[in-house]
């Protein structure tokens, strides 16, 4: 019998004993005038509350000794000692029923989250019809996804087009039309005709696996509120127990009545409402974010997102598609445009940069590697190589300046790659990037959710950077930056007491992602950027940042509501118990009822308004 089966078996036994105990409790009430009734009450008490007492004894000399089990044990045993058999057992029954209702409420919230994360499938069908375990499917394999089936892994669409339901990943109810060659995330549902897709990531690296892993590991990075509540309860519980012990000596009333009030005080003071509802609220917030395709690596980052003042954005791959197209080739020498393109393609052949991919696509010819004798990629500048025994410098204008090459700087928009051979300027290639649809109203909407300033940081030249910044109405732009320059700008902003977030996608963005208060990576970005980040936008839509901030603020507001409700009700009932206004019945309702209320209040986080 495994651990889960043991827990289920134990839970069933507890319920059976509780039912028997309740039946005996009713019998004891009926026979209340009979001398055997007290014995039946005690047997009933043991059957209903034995597990609570055992837990209290088990934790008695541990760091968790001051929990609700100890409080409930002291209160109910104390009530029996002063002859309040009826109320003592009634408190236990109500408390146990409350626990069952709490568990159901918590399970309900977990089911909602699991439904959001119920994206993973165990097998995939290959193009040849073979069924294979998802772990055994390799990059490059082609899979068949029939109508109504889920895409098993992150893929590139090989069919002409597809219609997909991506609501479980991005929260949008409308279907998405995808063209051939576009990326399709695991968990998307094919609602059109059967399609073929080429796998680009293994199971362990897929969008679905990252969602499940990050949500399951959420407890590792707890919010300040959760940590504060945990510390508060460790101090609060022994204090209220001490107050309850001292109450009979302080109150100038009959001892039996004073003890009864003291026991009421103990029951009401039980901190389980705080212990359950606060972590649950943040957990639900993470679930709501994952439903929108936003992965947070711990509840602490939901907390931090509510405090962000300024957001810094990378350009390529974040605000723009990062898929450049060659717009113009301009020779400034005796070389033809085709020769300019050929030399640049040879230089870029060994590079993984997005510009290199675009150049090679435009060149569209085989590369003879033997012609490339040396190749050095200089981050933030470009490439130096030896091709056909010639010294080649290929990159931005700073690279040519650093190599003392005389040239005429271009001031048109777009990204410019300059080419120099043996120290002589030969010409340039101009490339343009396209703006992502989700970036159009991003700045305006960020201001609406409380972000004071939006800044773009890019390594691109001034004209290309300002072109995009003006188009998107970005507040401030820094251009021609190296990775260390971006880190310096972020650190300066933090030194000015600003809470900052940075959004990027490339390997060179990982240092600045790590230095920001909240680092946000695009899901299609490099593994290092995703690993370094605190939040991942799996659907690669920059406007998901808006949803992330809205969800974090809604989560924090509802958690604060729960704390306020719990503390107000607790304080009122504690005061009433001191003055003898409450009974133990009301005490349990105050504790259990408020717990259930706050748990269901936490579930409202899922209902995010557009």
Image: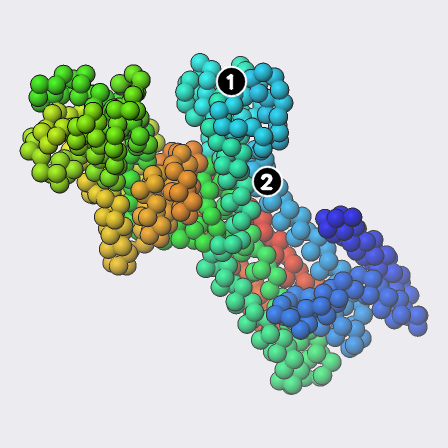
Q: Quadrant of the C terminus?
A: top left
Asked which quadrant contains residue 341, the reply is: top left
Q: Nearer the viewer, residue 566 or 195?
A: 195
Instruction: Using the image, determine if residue 551 lies above or below residue 125.
Output: below
Q: Is residue 190 visible?
A: no
Q: Is residue 10 visible?
A: yes
| Tag of residue 196 | 1
Which residue in the structure is indicated by mark 2?
Answer: 114
Q: Residues within 10 Å of mark 2 (few under 14, many from 20)?
A: some
Q: What's the residue at 59%, 22% (across, down)?
A: 125
Q: What's the residue at 57%, 20% (across, down)?
A: 126
Residue 483 at x, y percent in the picture? 26, 45
Q: What's the residue at 33%, 52% (across, down)?
A: 515
Q: Nearer the viewer, residue 204 or 566?
A: 204
Please report whichever mark, 1 or 2, sits nearer to the chain's N-terminal start.
2
Which circle, 1 or 2, is nearer the viewer? 1
- Tell me: 95 left or right of 575: right
Do residues under tags 1 and 2 come within 8 Å of each other at their CB atoms?
no
Residue 13 at x, y percent in the picture? 81, 54
Q: Nearer the viewer, residue 99 or 67?
A: 67
State how the image is colored: rainbow
Residue 566 at x, y percent in the picture? 55, 61
Kindly state the secondary structure of the residue where label 2 is placed.
helix
Q: Residues within 10 Å of mark 1 (few under 14, many from 20)?
A: many
Kindly state the secondary structure of the residue where label 1 is placed.
strand
């Amino acid at each position: 019998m495994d651990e889960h089966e043991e827990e289920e078996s134990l839970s069933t036994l507890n319920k059976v004993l509780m039912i028997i105990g309740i039946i005996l409790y009713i019998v004891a009430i009926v026979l209340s005038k009979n001398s055997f009734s007290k014995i039946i009450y005690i047997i009933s008490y043991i059957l209903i509350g034995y597990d609570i007492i055992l837990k209290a004894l088990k934790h008695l000399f541990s760091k968790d000794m001051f929990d609700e089990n100890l409080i409930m044990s002291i209160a109910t045993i104390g009530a029996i000692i002063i002859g309040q058999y009826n109320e003592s057992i009634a408190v236990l029954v109500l408390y146990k029923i409350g626990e069952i209702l709490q568990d159901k409420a918590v399970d309900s919230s977990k089911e909602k989250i699991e439904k959001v994360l119920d994206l993973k499938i165990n097998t995939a069908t290959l193009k040849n019809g073979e069924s294979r375990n998802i772990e055994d499917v390799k990059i490059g394999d082609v899979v068949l996804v029939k109508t109504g089936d889920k895409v098993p892994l992150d893929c590139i669409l090989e069919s002409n087009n597809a219609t997909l339901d991506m609501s479980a990943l991005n929260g949008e109810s409308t279907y998405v039309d995808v063209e051939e060659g576009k990326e399709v995330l695991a968990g998307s549902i094919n609602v059109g005709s059967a399609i073929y897709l080429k796998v680009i990531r293994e199971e362990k690296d897929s969008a679905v696996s990252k969602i499940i892993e990050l949500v399951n590991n959420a407890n590792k990075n707890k919010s300040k509120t959760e940590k504060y509540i945990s510390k508060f309860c460790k101090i609060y519980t022994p204090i209220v127990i001490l107050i309850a012990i001292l109450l009979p000596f302080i109150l100038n009333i009959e001892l039996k009545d004073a003890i009864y009030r003291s026991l009421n005080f103990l029951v009401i003071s039980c901190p389980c409402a705080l212990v359950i509802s606060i972590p649950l609220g943040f957990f639900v917030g993470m679930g709501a974010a994952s439903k929108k395709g936003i992965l947070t690596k711990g509840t602490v980052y939901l907390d931090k997102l509510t405090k962000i003042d300024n957001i810094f954005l990378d350009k390529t791959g974040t605000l723009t598609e990062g898929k450049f197209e060659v717009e113009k080739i301009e020779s400034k020498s005796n070389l033809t445009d085709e020769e300019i393109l050929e030399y640049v393609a040879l230089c870029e052949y060994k590079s993984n940069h997005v510009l290199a991919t675009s150049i090679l696509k435009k060149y569209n010819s085989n590369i003879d590697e033997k012609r490339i004798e040396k190749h050095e990629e200089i981050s933030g500048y470009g490439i130096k190589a030896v091709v056909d025994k010639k010294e080649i410098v290929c990159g931005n204008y700073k690279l040519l300046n650093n190599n003392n090459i005389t040239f005429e700087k271009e001031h048109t928009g777009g990204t410019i790659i300059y080419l120099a051979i043996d120290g002589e300027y030969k010409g340039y290639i101009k490339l343009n990037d396209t703006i992502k649809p989700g970036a159009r109203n991003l700045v305006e909407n960020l201001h609406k959710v409380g972000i004071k300033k939006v800044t773009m940081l890019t390594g691109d030249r001034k004209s290309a950077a300002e072109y995009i910044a003006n188009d998107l109405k970005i507040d401030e732009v820094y251009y021609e930056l190296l990775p260390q320059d971006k880190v310096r700008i972020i650190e300066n902003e933090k030194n000015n007491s600003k809470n900052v977030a940075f959004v990027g996608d490339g390997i060179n963005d990982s240092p600045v992602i790590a230095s920001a208060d909240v680092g946000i990576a695009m899901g299609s970005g490099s593994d290092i950027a995703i690993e370094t980040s605190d939040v991942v936008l799996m659907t690669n839509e920059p406007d998901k940042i808006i949803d992330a901030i809205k969800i974090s603020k809604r989560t924090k507001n509802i958690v604060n509501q729960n704390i306020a409700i719990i503390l107000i009700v607790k304080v009122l009932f504690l005061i009433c118990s001191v003055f003898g206004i409450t009974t133990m019945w009301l005490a349990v309702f105050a504790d259990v009822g408020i717990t259930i209320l706050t748990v269901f209040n936490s579930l409202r986080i899922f209902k995010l308004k557009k």
